[in-house]
Image (spheres, rainbow, N blue to C red):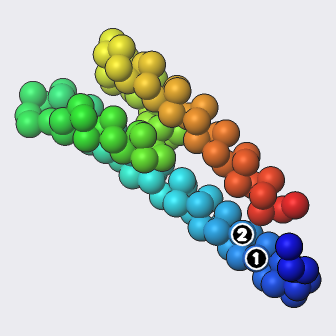
Amino acid sequence: MPPVDKNKKILIIKDMKNYFVFIIIYYILISLYAVALTVFDKSRALKRKRRIPENALLWIGVLGGAGGMYPAMKLIHHKTRVKRFMVLLPACIIVHLIIFVVLGVLAFI
């Protein structure tokens, strides 16, 4: 195996830190978006108007919004009787935390 240039290794580590910061910003933004969608859907439900499809809400959760969506749903009592949300969103949170920790460790080794 050829020797690794130390400058390249340092550059890769700096890039990982940049990616990690990007991932943090992504999770914050998608969580805020998920909370906004949840509150909007709840308000539409109270007014008996057209709602956001459940699959759309679930996909936002899977793509990173579960960390904001689940507490918002519990707080405003929205979709708390729908088992798919009450099982899938906490599972997504756990998976996202594992990914976040692994990427964080890789970024700061």
Q: Is residue 56 above or below residue 7?
A: above
Residue 64 lies, in percent from the top left, at 48, 46
Q: How many marks?
A: 2
Label 1, label 2: how far apart the Cα atoms are: 6 Å
Q: Would you call the spot at circle 2 few (<14 residues within 10 Å), some (14-19), or many (20 or more)?
A: some
Q: Residue 6's quadrant in the figure?
A: bottom right
Residue at x 84% of width, y 62% of height = 108
Q: Residue furthest front?
A: 1
Q: Residue 96's quadrant in the figure?
A: top right
Query: Which amino acid, mark 2?
Result: Met
Q: Residue 98's quadrant in the figure?
A: top right
Residue at x 25% of width, y 41% of height = 56
Q: Is residue 2 above or below residue 25?
A: below
Residue 77 in view of the camera: no
- Would you say 96 lies left or right of 47 here? right
Quarter of the picture containing the N terminus is bottom right
Q: Which residue is mark 2?
A: 16
Q: Would you say the residues marked 1 and 2 are in contact, meaning their CB atoms lie under 8 Å apart?
A: yes
Residue 14 lies, in percent from the top left, at 77, 77
Q: Is residue 3 above or below residue 68?
A: below
Query: Which amino acid, mark 1?
Result: Ile
- Secondary structure, mark 2, is helix
Q: Nearer the viewer, residue 45 or 56?
A: 56
Q: Which residue is mark 1?
A: 12
Residue 82 lies, in percent from the top left, at 31, 16
Residue 103 lies, in percent from the top left, at 70, 54
- Secondary structure, mark 1, is helix
Residue at x 87% of width, y 61% of height = 109
